[in-house]
Amino acid sequence: MSGEGTRPARQFAALPFTIGSDGDPRILLVTSRDTGRWVLPKGWPDGADATDADTARREAFEEAGIHGEIVGLREVGAYRYVQTGKDGVAVNCRVGVFALRVSGLAKTWPEKGQRVLRWCAPKQGARLVQEPELAALLSTFKPPVEF
């Protein structure tokens, strides 16, 4: 799947957020299990996911114990990165990002203890992530209007 002209593999991420008492959004980042870099909860679709947004919501729970609802009907953005598998093969990935309003955090979840969670302002989050397109998305993040 790697190489020029290859269509990128598709993953989906949640951009978990809440609104602070000051009215400003706060976002939740997690560390990756392999490198410890700051990322959004993301992953591959599976057969149980009815929609791309369902994949994002499932990954948010598995990776960070997040309960919440996807806001809006569409992705709030996307970014690309290269994932290197355990076999050493590099895969170009396109990650569609869905805003997820956090309603609570679970006491236990599948990857508890494997990742660190961090609440921050969107601009601060943009400085923490390594992917330039993700940083641009975070730096301008405004929660979508609910309908």
Image: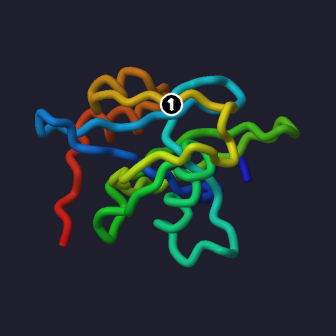
Residue closer to the observer: 36 or 91? 36
> Residue 139: image x %, image y %?
27, 33
Residue at the image point whose x is 33% and y is 28% from the top: 120
Quarter holding residue 49? bottom right
The residue lying furthest to the right in this view is 87
Residue on which disc 1 sits: 117
Outermost front residue? 107
Given residues 107 and 77, the one toward you in this image is 107
| Horizontal side of residue 69 vs 87, given as left or right | left
For the point 56% across and 63% down, which residue is it?
55
| Horizontal arrangement in the rendering, residue 108 relative to residue 57 (left or right) | right
Picture quadrant where residue 23 is located: top left
Residue at screen point 63% across, 45% down: 108
| Secondary structure beneath label 1 | strand
Where is 83 relative to 115, above or below? below
Which percent across, then down, holds residue 28? Answer: 41, 37
Report the front residue among 128 and 16. 16
Q: Nearer the viewer, residue 47 or 60?
A: 60
Quadrant where the image shows the C terminus: bottom left
- Residue 143 is situated, as x and y percent measured from the top left of the image, at 23, 51
Q: Amino acid at mark 1?
A: Leu
Q: How many marks?
A: 1
Q: x, y (%) of residue 129? A: 45, 27
**Vertical position of residue 77 compared to residue 19: above or below:** below
Residue situated furthest left in the rendering? 22
Q: How is the image coloured?
A: rainbow
Which residue does the image show at 57% across and 29% down from the upper left?
A: 31
Mark 1 neighbour density, 10 Å: few (under 14) some (14–19) many (20 or more): some
| Residue farthest to the bottom, as pictured | 50
